[in-house]
Image: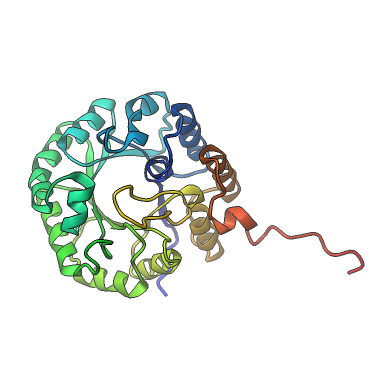
Amino acid sequence: MHQPERVTLREVAPRDGLQNEPPVPTADKIRLIDALARTGLSRIEAVSFVSPKAVPQMADAADVWAAVEKHPGIRYSALAPNRRGVERALDAGFTAVEVVVSASETHNRANVGRTVAESLAELPDICALAKEHLAAVEVIIATSFGCPFEGDIDPAQVARIVEAAEAAGAGRIAFGDTTGMGTPRRVTDLLDAVDTGLPMLMHFHDTRGTALANLLTALDRGVTEFDASVGGIGGCPFAPGASGNVATEEVVHMLHDMGVDTGVDLDALIGTAELAQEIVGRPLESGVLRAGPRTRLSPRPEGL
């Protein structure tokens, strides 16, 4: 198995995580982002600039970003579905924006209210606008491994979107497993189909328990950038069954035991997962949050 010395994680709980929960107070969002910044994470997806009618959980994005303590060593990013959202992100001061396009026509219409062709047609203008602001653009391809409405997605379809994004001037590509339909075979098939020199990132949901297996498959193929969400919170409001992302602490726990560096303090991360659990007000599904790391031993029974 190919094993890199280091993997970079982008924490998505403040955006992808909280967008699938009942609206959380602004102050709690700020607490979560600032706590994540103290764990050693180098990338945090902080907010999204979307219609407050469509996603009321993100209506306070500008207020959250204005109050967050910015750490110079962290790359903060914002997600946007269209040019208007990108403009708002740039006006707020972000230098890294993520534009989402679905590989599935049905999901793209449900998620951003337009056809895939319409989303792609806007990309060159978005990339040019970002360049004027010295900002980087990443294109996230949702439903890359399957769609809850259409079923299987042909990897060639994803590859065509990658080509369009690269031609438009995007600097990074991410592949989203929006409802956890990915499997190691499908990760392999997608990477076989995609031909790009752009940095690639994988975004896995653990809906069907395959996220860590998918991550290892991508790792073996040379991918070293992944999204994860503390506590495993997250999902897509516009995709049935889009339960939580792979938990950041589970990814870090596994990679560190393999000898792969992430730069993240696992104990601090678990403490932040506990904070996330407190904020959302329900038990989270992360196994490492529930059981602790494998190094946490129980007292020996008396007499043994």
**Residue 172 at x, y percent in the picture:** 24, 51
**Residue 12 at x, y percent in the picture:** 40, 46
On the picture, is 45 further left or further right than 79? right
On the picture, is 185 further left or further right than 252? left
Residue 282 in which image quadrant: top right
The quarter of the rendered structure image containing the C terminus is bottom right
**Residue 81 at x, y percent in the picture:** 21, 42
Considering only vertical position in the picture, is 86 above or below 220?
above
Report how many numbered discs are placed on residues in the image.
0
Q: Residue at x 34, y 30 (%)?
A: 61
Q: Residue at x 20, y 35 (%)?
A: 86
- For the rendered model, the colour scheme is rainbow
Q: Residue at x 32, y 26 (%)?
A: 62
**Residue 208 at x, y percent in the picture:** 42, 66
Q: Looking at the picture, tell me which residue is in the foreground, 67 or 84.
A: 84
Q: Which residue is drawn at 90% across and 64% down?
A: 302
Considering only vertical position in the picture, is 39 above or below 217?
above
On the picture, is 272 further left or further right than 295? left
Q: Looking at the picture, tell me which residue is in the foreground, 128 or 17.
A: 17
Residue 1 in which image quadrant: bottom left
